[in-house]
Image (cartoon, grey):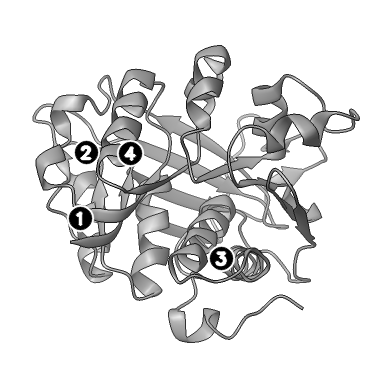
Amino acid sequence: MFDIISIGAATADIFLKSDNLSQSTRFISLKRSSKNEISQSLICSGGGATNSATTFARFGLKTAVVSLIGTDPLSEYIKKDLKDEKISTQFLVQKKKEDTDFSIVLVAADGTRSILTNRGSTRLESRDIPFSKIKAKWLYLTSLEGNLPLFEEILGFAKENDIKVSFNPGHRELSQRRELIPLLKHLDFLLLNRYEAEVLVDTKHKSSDFWDKLKKLAPIVAVTNGRRGAKILTPSDSYFSPIINTTPLDETGAGDAFGSAFVSALFYDRSLSDALSWGINNSASVVSAFGAKAGILTFNKIKNFYAS
């Protein structure tokens, strides 16, 4: 029996930071035909499923990952990181002759980043998930690469087995917003960033009905807004927290850190205010380190954070 199982993306992430990366409000760039020095680099596992599972494991929860990887050398980075964090790999799906998804993360001096992602030709399908062996109190879903039939099947399975479900959709799910929205009411927690929220409800955040539309989607909805903090919505209430004043080294994984810490707090029966505090503190710690996992807090640290 697992406490939480993360389902979704697993990638090999290659982080590259260079002092020669120019940054503006809209672009991170390099001069054409230039040769530039790398000031910092890292190769590690990434993707929403492995990032969230790392938070759960460090918070003392028994955790597994359901993800699709290849059999190439990059897959070894993912398996090693998971095993080092004591995350079960028994549900990893390795496809022969398939390349592991990977990302190149270009990090500028102020911590902002742009990501180039290479995704394989296959995605998780129902046949890849051993439903008869899935025993957990929570399922934490990240992008399923647009596979809404699988999303609906997982929701049905969870309801039949009294399992709570959290979901952080990707752009391929959001591109099917009309089909997606009716399914969200079956969630226990929905995580979005501001852009994703705008796409999902087809409304800009400055519109008067933006927040009212969001709170109708799921019992608990979180909307993160980068350096402007995060807001939690329920049908009857809302909570807001600014970010913690910190110097970001790399913003990769901030959303994963927030959502997984928030769900961990719900698992431990903390209040929504405390859950928001856990999410804000975990994401602040992650952006203060290089890569999406190095800064993830441990349970001994996070349990002392309460909402003010």
Which type of secondary structure does the marked residue at label 4 adopt?
Answer: helix
Q: Circle 2: is it few (<14), some (14-19), or many (20+) Cα within 10 Å?
A: many
The three-letter amino acid code for the residue at tag 1 is: Lys
Asked whether residue 130 appears in the rendered view, the answer is no
Identify the residue under disc 4: 159
The three-letter amino acid code for the residue at tag 3 is: Val
Q: Distance between the residues labelled 4 and 3?
A: 33 Å
Residues marked 4 and 1 touching at CB (< 8 Å): no
In this rendering, is residue 187 above or below 184? below
Identify the residue under disc 2: 69
Identify the disc placed on residue 79: 1
Q: How far apart are marks 3 and 2 (CA)?
A: 24 Å
Q: Distance between the residues labelled 4 and 2?
A: 28 Å
Residues marked 1 and 2 touching at CB (< 8 Å): yes
Among the two numbered marks 3 and 1 on one chain, the one whose residue lies closer to the N terminus: 1
User: Quick one: quadrant of the N terminus?
Assistant: bottom left
Q: Distance between the residues labelled 3 and 1?
A: 21 Å
Relative image position of residue 110 (x, y in whole percent): 73, 57
Q: Circle 1: is it few (<14), some (14-19), or many (20+) Cα within 10 Å?
A: some
Q: How far apart are marks 1 and 2 (CA)?
A: 9 Å
Relative image position of residue 124 (x, y in whole percent): 25, 29
Among the two numbered marks 1 and 2 on one chain, the one whose residue lies closer to the N terminus: 2
Identify the disc placed on residue 286: 3
Residue 43 appears in which quarter of the rendering? Answer: bottom left
Among the two numbered marks 4 and 3 on one chain, the one whose residue lies closer to the N terminus: 4
Answer with left or right where residue 303 lies relative to residue 109.
Answer: left
The three-letter amino acid code for the residue at tag 2 is: Ile
The three-letter amino acid code for the residue at tag 4 is: Lys
